[in-house]
Amino acid sequence: MPALPSLILYFSLFVSLFFEVVILITYFETREEIKFEEEHLKKPILSYPSVSIIVPSFNEEATVAGTIDSLLKLDYPADKLSLLLIDDGSSDKTLEVMNRYKDHSQVRIFSKPNEGSKFAALNFALERVETDLVGCLDADSFVAPGALKLMIPFFEDAETMAVTPAVKIHEPKNLLQRIQKMEYIWGVLFRRMLSSMGAMYVTPGPFSIFRTRVFRELGGYRLAHHTEDMEMALRMQKNHYKIVNSVGAHVFTVAPDKIKALYKQRVRWSYGFLNNAIDYKDMYFNRKYGHIGMFILPIATLSVFNTLYAAVMFVWGIGIKSAHAFTKYQVVGFSAHAPSLNFNWFYWNTSVLICVALVAVAINITLLLLSAGIAKEEKFIGKELLYYLTLYIFLPPFWLAKSTYNTVFSKKISWR
């Protein structure tokens, strides 16, 4: 009988492969649906609803002007679009930059003391919203001119309560940002498949658009472990509010360019997921919540622990091999003899574990290439794909370990 570690490893690989196959099958099932949406979105909009976009800013003097400019360039009737710029107690020149737009007819500017998290700034603005729809755009993000027009038709369905965009990386410059570019491209496909399953569990801060009545009926944003966009999506799902994704509505966000900044961001995200999962644990394996309760939330949670287990086993394996090498050195000394590079198919490892792993990798590459297509990436993503496949795998265990530790021992985290 296989040892327990092997059983866990087989189970982890099976879960990963099963999840990838489900996403792949969902993609092939929804291709016609996506094509129909693309054709429908080309039709002229007969009636434009009024929209408010909230821009909460804390020490964003370097990017907030670009964010505001991108919103003012939206292809949308000016009399139907208003911007609420919120300076959330910035200590830099953010408010000064905002005030350059104070005479613009579409802009309203507010300043408030910082309360430690973005949710307070969002709720401050929501109290002043009177439009049909409302959205948010982080002050380090930029929206494509046609994005809003590609989201509005989804609200023709009276049951649709929120529409999320396709979030991509803005002008990646270094290796770390290029790795994230591929991660975000994969996210474009993933969110679109979740939309088809009715299982969206995040309404991203960059430019998710809601019916304003969602906040009147369910209440405003909550602190939610500094992941208010995830909690809002879970609250909507729990109340059976429909969330869809507009894969053509592109929004660009500035990615962390240093390991420390990326680490802190991802610790917050994964910590928020784990703790929101605990808050909404009654949705797990509950049939009345459909795919999100029966499949997506459980497998997303399981993937956290699978990743940590795989990392531990990897480090353990390296440790064992290093110990054996050291013992060999003590016995026979150092050998400069290089191993033979001759390849013989007879010695190819054909174990079930290796075969399953290779299939999982092949499907993963296929999904990444399909993601690039659906995300409308015009340039060849060969380098980004290579960086992602060879380097990204080593990063998540660090922030997942920290966020799990913080969750288990009730350690609080900060927004920044």
Image: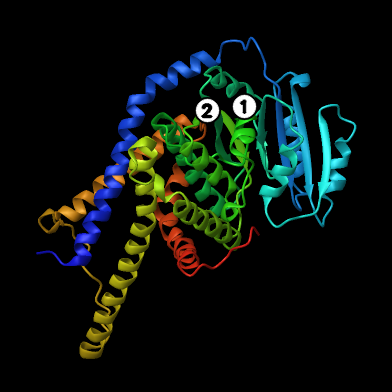
Judging by the rendered image, the residue that carries numbered circle 1 is 147
Residue shown at the point (41%, 20%) measured from the top left: 33
State the residue in front, 223 or 356. 223
Left or right, residue 169 beside residue 102 = left
Left or right, residue 32 beside residue 269 = left
Answer few, some or many: residues within 10 Å of disc 2's Cα (few below 14, many 20 plus, some between 14 and 19): many
Give coordinates of residue 258: x percent, y percent.
Answer: 60, 59
Q: Residue furthest right?
A: 103
Judging by the rendered image, the residue that carries numbered circle 2 is 246
Residue shown at the point (76%, 55%) measured from the top left: 114
Contact, CB < 8 Å: mark 1 with mark 2?
Answer: yes
Give coordinates of residue 69: x percent, y percent.
Answer: 76, 34
Left or right, residue 343 beside residue 280 = left
Residue 196, quarter of the rendered image: top left
Q: Residue furthest front?
A: 217
The N terminus lies in quadrant:
bottom left
Give the mark nearer the N terminus: 1 vs 2: 1
Residue shown at the point (62%, 27%) measured from the top left: 147
Q: Looking at the image, can residue 211 be seen?
A: no
**SS at mark 1?**
loop
Q: Looking at the image, can residue 287 be seen?
A: yes
Give coordinates of residue 206: x percent, y percent.
Answer: 62, 39
The answer to whether 9 is drawn above or below residue 189 in the figure is below
State the residue in front, 132 or 323. 132
Residue 86, quarter of the rendered image: top right
Answer few, some or many: residues within 10 Å of disc 1's Cα (few below 14, many 20 plus, some between 14 and 19): many
Q: Amino acid at mark 1?
A: Ala
Q: How many numbered discs sit on the rendered protein?
A: 2
Residue shown at the point (21%, 88%) measured from the top left: 332
